[in-house]
Image (cartoon, rainbow, N blue to C red):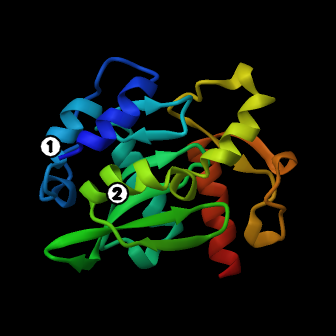
Amino acid sequence: MFERFWAAYSGLRDTSEAGSVWTHQRLKALDGYIAFAREFAGASFDGGVYRVHDDRTGPQALSLVTDAFPEFAERVCPFGYDWLGRQFAVDSGRVVGQEPQVLLLEPGTGEALEIPFSFAAFHDVELVDHSDAALASAFFADWSRSNTDQLPLRRDECVGYRIPLFLGGDDTLVNLEVSDIDVYWTLCGQLRGQTF
């Protein structure tokens, strides 16, 4: 389990030290989660395109997600996030073969998108075979070329939309800026609450 993720991502790791495992009950029950988190908790990959939560960032992300997306508060738990600040979470409201499926929570669009993979398959299939679809990695490469001084992104940073897409902002490089992830999620969550 996770051999394909390891082969594809271990060489892209921005930090060599593992953080402390976040042991939320929804995560501990996942097949392979504890072993994965012991190796990758707190890890950032390829300049911050994908990051795994640890015992500090995980609880913060859960609070941000439940405030911005209260309709999912009782069923999700984030395990990772990408450069755009989007949170990847397990969704106990969608279970296939006894495994919760992954939900992508997007602050910039105000949407929650269902990903038809378990935690393990998300890492070994989706992030390996479909990294651009999962992480907008081509968009990240475009942004990175003119922002090399910002890389790697700090764990408390994301590249957010100046004007969220759900308020008419453009999905373009000029509408992006480095933001504090807590501030970005809080603002987008408040705006989402007034809009949706």
Q: Nearer the viewer, residue 59 or 112?
A: 112
Q: Quadrant of residue 25?
A: bottom left
Residue 119 drawn at (x, y percent): 27, 58
Looking at the rendered structure, the number of numbered marks drawn on it comes to 2
Residue plotted at (40% across, 74% down): 72
Residue 29 drawn at (x, y percent): 12, 59
Residue plotted at (23% across, 40% down): 3
Q: Residues within 10 Å of mark 1 (few under 14, many from 20)?
A: some
Residue 144 drawn at (x, y percent): 71, 32
- On screen, residue 105 above or below 114: above
Residue plotted at (57% across, 52% down): 132
Q: Quadrant of residue 22?
A: top left
**Nearest to N terminus: mark 2 or mark 1:** 1
Amino acid beneath label 1: Ile
Tag 1 residue:
34
Residue plotted at (13% across, 74% down): 98
- Dot 2: element: helix
Residue 41 seen anywhere in this rendered image of the structure: no
Residue 162 drawn at (x, y percent): 80, 51
Give the quadrant of the C terminus. Answer: bottom right
Q: Residue furthest right?
A: 174
- On screen, residue 13 above or below 133: above
Q: Quadrant of residue 55?
A: top left
